[in-house]
């Protein structure tokens, strides 16, 4: 069991060629655009969900920040659908890869920071040195604030990676224990199976919550710089 513990996190290949790009593009199929005059229930739910996300995320933003609405909505729907699809058996979850999460976090964080330095230079520089700071602490505070600024995208990516990976590992371990206990102690296996079902339902919630947290933090970074 230990040998195959991290098998689900390995990059899948077909005939020696990685198919990560195909997997990453797959969630977009779940959100088709409608050309009908009257939408069906799926499209109506999709439109309601998009309006709800825009209302929640863009409420605190200025008109300049609201230009990122499409990016924010696309981000949360992509991460949420990818996390949910990764809970299906024999599937690969791209958000368990730190490299992919960094590739999402760094450009979004950098875009927000550059936007802040371009349009709110004084306010952006003021974050590095709070008002009333003693002269002796100024160099140290500037170093600390600079480090905390550059840690933000790493924290975004690590948080998402760690939460999704931990949940998948727990499901794998408890599922393996349930299979072993079926032949040793059926009552105990029943209890572990119930725990597995509860954990799976919890992971569905975690998949959506982590997508919301990731997008919310990006939205807050954007709000601080617009």
Image (tube, rainbow, N blue to C red):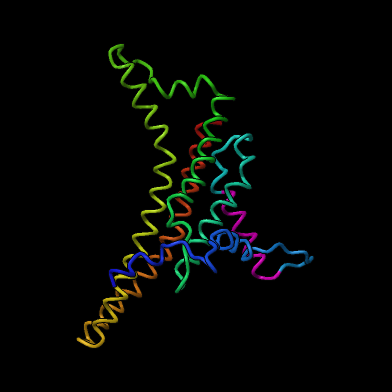
Q: Which of the 4 image quadrants contains residue 164? A: bottom left
- Number of callouts in the render? 0
Q: Position of residue 17 (x, y in %)?
A: 55, 63
**Which residue is depicted at the point 28% across and 69% down?**
2
Nearer-the-camera pick, 109 or 52: 109
Nearer-the-camera pick, 156 or 5: 5
Looking at the image, residue 201 lies above or below residue 74: below
Looking at this view, name the residue that lies furthest to the front: 16
Looking at this view, name the residue that lies furthest to the right: 37
Q: Position of residue 26 (x, y in %)?
A: 59, 64
Looking at the image, residue 132 lies above or below residue 162: above
Q: Position of residue 105 (x, y in %)?
A: 49, 44
Q: Position of residue 160 (x, y in %)?
A: 41, 52
**Which residue is depicted at the point 59% across and 37% down?**
65
Nearer-the-camera pick, 213 or 96: 96
Q: Main secondary structure of the magenta part?
A: helix
State left or right for residue 58 relative to residue 181. right
> In which quadrant is the N terminus drawn?
bottom left
Looking at this view, name the residue that lies furthest to the top: 135
Looking at the image, residue 129 lies above or below residue 59: above
State left or right for residue 3 relative to residue 20. left
- Please tell me whether residue 46 belongs to the stretch shown in magenta: yes
- Please tell me whether residue 45 belongs to the stretch shown in magenta: yes
State left or right for residue 169 relative to residue 211. left
State left or right for residue 206 relative to residue 1. right
**Which residue is depicted at the point 31% across and 66% down?**
170
Range of magenta residues: 40-55
Nearer-the-camera pick, 106 or 186: 106
**Which residue is depicted at the point 50% across and 42% down?**
218
């Amino acid at each position: 069991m230990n040998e195959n513990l991290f098998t689900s996190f390995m990059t899948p290949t077909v005939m020696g060629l990685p198919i990560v790009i195909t997997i990453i593009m797959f969630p977009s199929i779940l959100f088709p655009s409608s050309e009908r005059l009257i939408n069906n229930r799926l499209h109506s739910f999709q439109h309601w969900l998009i309006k709800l996300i825009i209302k929640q995320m863009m409420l605190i933003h200025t008109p300049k920040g609201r230009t990122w609405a499409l990016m924010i909505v696309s981000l949360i729907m992509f991460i949420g659908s990818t996390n949910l699809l990764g809970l299906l058996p024999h599937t690969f979850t791209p958000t368990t890869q730190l490299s992919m999460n960094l590739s999402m976090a760094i450009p979004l964080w950098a875009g927000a920071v550059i936007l802040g330095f371009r349009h709110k230079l004084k306010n952006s520089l003021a974050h590095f040195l709070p008002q009333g700071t003693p002269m002796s602490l100024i160099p140290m505070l500037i170093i600390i604030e600079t480090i905390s600024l550059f840690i933000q995208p790493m924290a975004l990516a690590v948080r998402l990676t760690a939460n999704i990976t931990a949940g998948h590992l727990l499901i794998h371990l408890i599922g393996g224990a349930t299979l072993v206990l079926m032949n040793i102690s059926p009552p105990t296996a029943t209890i572990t199976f119930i725990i597995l079902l509860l954990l799976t339902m919890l992971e569905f919630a975690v998949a959506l919550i982590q997508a919301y947290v990731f997008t919310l933090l990006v939205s807050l970074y954007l709000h601080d710089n617009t």
